[in-house]
Image (tube, rainbow, N blue to C red):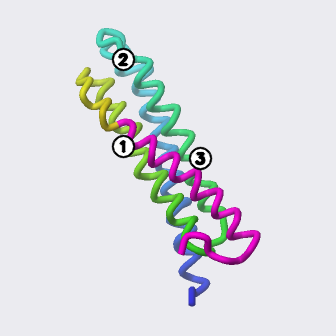
Amino acid sequence: MRRKGDSLMKSSFWLRAGAISGFLAVALGAFGAHGLRARLEALGTAATHQTAVHYHLAHALALLVVALLPARGKARGVAGVAFLVGTVLFSGSLYVLAVSGQKWLGAITPFGGVGFLTGWVALAFTGKEQETGVSTTS
Protein backbone atom coordinates (compact mmCIF):
# COMPACT_ATOMS: atom_id res chain seq x y z
CA MET A 1 0.00 0.00 0.00
CA ARG A 2 1.31 3.38 -0.95
CA ARG A 3 1.37 6.18 1.62
CA LYS A 4 0.18 9.62 0.61
CA GLY A 5 3.52 11.18 1.57
CA ASP A 6 5.38 8.81 -0.78
CA SER A 7 3.48 10.00 -3.85
CA LEU A 8 3.95 13.64 -2.86
CA MET A 9 7.68 13.07 -2.51
CA LYS A 10 7.86 11.44 -5.92
CA SER A 11 5.83 14.26 -7.47
CA SER A 12 8.20 16.78 -5.94
CA PHE A 13 11.17 14.79 -7.30
CA TRP A 14 9.78 14.91 -10.85
CA LEU A 15 8.94 18.59 -10.45
CA ARG A 16 12.51 19.36 -9.36
CA ALA A 17 13.96 17.15 -12.10
CA GLY A 18 11.86 18.90 -14.74
CA ALA A 19 12.69 22.37 -13.43
CA ILE A 20 16.43 21.65 -13.25
CA SER A 21 16.38 20.05 -16.69
CA GLY A 22 14.53 23.06 -18.12
CA PHE A 23 17.02 25.43 -16.49
CA LEU A 24 19.92 23.48 -17.97
CA ALA A 25 18.32 23.41 -21.43
CA VAL A 26 17.91 27.20 -21.44
CA ALA A 27 21.41 27.76 -20.03
CA LEU A 28 23.06 25.41 -22.54
CA GLY A 29 21.04 26.95 -25.36
CA ALA A 30 22.16 30.44 -24.40
CA PHE A 31 25.75 29.30 -23.95
CA GLY A 32 25.69 27.68 -27.37
CA ALA A 33 24.19 30.74 -29.02
CA HIS A 34 26.64 33.16 -27.42
CA GLY A 35 29.69 31.65 -25.70
CA LEU A 36 30.19 28.70 -28.07
CA ARG A 37 28.90 30.29 -31.26
CA ALA A 38 32.29 30.63 -32.98
CA ARG A 39 33.37 27.09 -32.04
CA LEU A 40 30.08 25.51 -33.16
CA GLU A 41 30.21 27.39 -36.46
CA ALA A 42 33.86 26.41 -37.01
CA LEU A 43 33.01 22.75 -36.41
CA GLY A 44 29.80 22.99 -38.42
CA THR A 45 27.80 21.66 -35.47
CA ALA A 46 25.54 24.60 -34.56
CA ALA A 47 22.46 22.73 -35.85
CA THR A 48 23.44 19.66 -33.80
CA HIS A 49 23.65 21.79 -30.67
CA GLN A 50 20.28 23.36 -31.45
CA THR A 51 18.72 19.90 -31.86
CA ALA A 52 20.10 18.90 -28.46
CA VAL A 53 18.60 22.02 -26.85
CA HIS A 54 15.24 21.52 -28.58
CA TYR A 55 14.80 17.92 -27.38
CA HIS A 56 16.23 18.73 -23.96
CA LEU A 57 13.69 21.49 -23.37
CA ALA A 58 10.77 19.48 -24.76
CA HIS A 59 11.52 16.60 -22.40
CA ALA A 60 12.07 18.91 -19.43
CA LEU A 61 8.45 19.93 -19.99
CA ALA A 62 7.48 16.27 -20.25
CA LEU A 63 9.03 15.71 -16.81
CA LEU A 64 6.84 18.52 -15.46
CA VAL A 65 3.81 16.70 -16.89
CA VAL A 66 4.96 13.53 -15.11
CA ALA A 67 5.13 15.54 -11.86
CA LEU A 68 1.51 16.64 -12.24
CA LEU A 69 0.11 13.14 -12.69
CA PRO A 70 -1.21 11.12 -9.75
CA ALA A 71 1.09 8.27 -8.71
CA ARG A 72 -0.92 5.19 -9.68
CA GLY A 73 0.81 2.10 -10.96
CA LYS A 74 4.30 2.06 -12.40
CA ALA A 75 3.83 3.86 -15.71
CA ARG A 76 4.43 7.34 -14.31
CA GLY A 77 7.79 6.35 -12.83
CA VAL A 78 8.77 4.52 -16.02
CA ALA A 79 7.92 7.63 -18.05
CA GLY A 80 9.96 9.90 -15.80
CA VAL A 81 13.01 7.65 -15.75
CA ALA A 82 12.81 7.13 -19.52
CA PHE A 83 12.63 10.90 -20.14
CA LEU A 84 15.64 11.49 -17.87
CA VAL A 85 17.72 8.72 -19.44
CA GLY A 86 16.65 9.84 -22.90
CA THR A 87 17.74 13.40 -22.17
CA VAL A 88 21.16 12.34 -20.90
CA LEU A 89 21.82 9.98 -23.81
CA PHE A 90 20.20 11.93 -26.65
CA SER A 91 20.86 15.56 -25.79
CA GLY A 92 24.00 14.79 -23.80
CA SER A 93 25.64 12.95 -26.68
CA LEU A 94 24.68 15.73 -29.10
CA TYR A 95 26.03 18.44 -26.78
CA VAL A 96 29.38 16.69 -26.50
CA LEU A 97 29.44 15.91 -30.24
CA ALA A 98 28.68 19.55 -31.07
CA VAL A 99 31.52 20.90 -28.92
CA SER A 100 34.10 18.20 -29.65
CA GLY A 101 33.33 17.33 -33.26
CA GLN A 102 33.65 13.63 -32.34
CA LYS A 103 31.13 12.11 -34.77
CA TRP A 104 31.24 8.64 -33.15
CA LEU A 105 29.14 10.08 -30.31
CA GLY A 106 26.23 10.10 -32.75
CA ALA A 107 26.06 6.32 -32.24
CA ILE A 108 24.83 6.95 -28.67
CA THR A 109 22.08 9.36 -29.68
CA PRO A 110 19.54 6.75 -30.93
CA PHE A 111 19.55 5.07 -27.51
CA GLY A 112 18.36 8.37 -26.07
CA GLY A 113 15.67 8.48 -28.74
CA VAL A 114 14.49 5.05 -27.59
CA GLY A 115 14.34 6.46 -24.07
CA PHE A 116 12.16 9.33 -25.27
CA LEU A 117 9.84 6.97 -27.16
CA THR A 118 9.60 4.69 -24.13
CA GLY A 119 8.68 7.68 -21.99
CA TRP A 120 5.88 8.73 -24.32
CA VAL A 121 4.45 5.19 -24.46
CA ALA A 122 4.63 4.94 -20.66
CA LEU A 123 2.90 8.32 -20.41
CA ALA A 124 0.06 6.93 -22.55
CA PHE A 125 -0.22 3.96 -20.18
CA THR A 126 -0.31 6.40 -17.26
CA GLY A 127 -3.43 7.87 -18.85
CA LYS A 128 -4.93 4.40 -19.07
CA GLU A 129 -4.13 3.79 -15.39
CA GLN A 130 -5.93 7.02 -14.51
CA GLU A 131 -9.05 5.85 -16.39
CA THR A 132 -9.18 2.36 -14.93
CA GLY A 133 -7.41 2.76 -11.59
CA VAL A 134 -5.45 -0.40 -12.48
CA SER A 135 -1.74 -0.61 -13.17
CA THR A 136 -1.05 -1.54 -16.81
CA THR A 137 2.68 -2.07 -16.26
CA SER A 138 2.73 -4.60 -13.44
Quarter in which the N terminus is drawn: bottom right
Tell me where the magenta segment starts and ends, as one range. Answer: 109-138
Element marked by disc 2? loop
Classify 10 Å Cα crowding around label 3: few (below 14), some (14-19), many (20 and above): some
Instruction: Return the residue found at the far right.
Output: 131
Element marked by disc 1? helix
Left of 4 or right of it: where is 36? left
Q: CA distance from mark 1 to mark 2?
A: 18 Å
Asked whether the beta carbons under mark 1 and mark 2 sit within 8 Å of each other, the answer is no
Residue 101's spot in the image, x, y percent?
26, 20
> Vertical placement of 34 versus 62: above or below?
above
Q: Amino acid at mark 2?
A: Thr
Q: Nearer the viewer, residue 63 or 138?
A: 138
- Residue 132 lies in magenta, yes or no? yes
For the stretch drawn in magenta, what is the main secondary structure? helix
Name the residue tied to disc 1: 89
> Vertical placement of 18 versus 107: above or below?
below
What residue lies at 57% left-to-right and 40% top-to-bottom? 58
Residue 134's spot in the image, x, y percent?
67, 77
Classify 10 Å Cα crowding around label 2: few (below 14), some (14-19), many (20 and above): many
Q: Amino acid at mark 3?
A: Leu
What residue lies at 45% left-to-right and 45% top-to-bottom? 114
Q: Amino acid at mark 1?
A: Leu
Which of discs 1 and 2 lies nearer the camera? The answer is 1
Which disc, if any, is residue 45? 2
Please tell me which of labels 3 and 2 falls first in the chain.
2
Classify 10 Å Cα crowding around label 1: few (below 14), some (14-19), many (20 and above): many
Left of 30 or right of it: where is 129? right
Name the residue tied to disc 3: 61
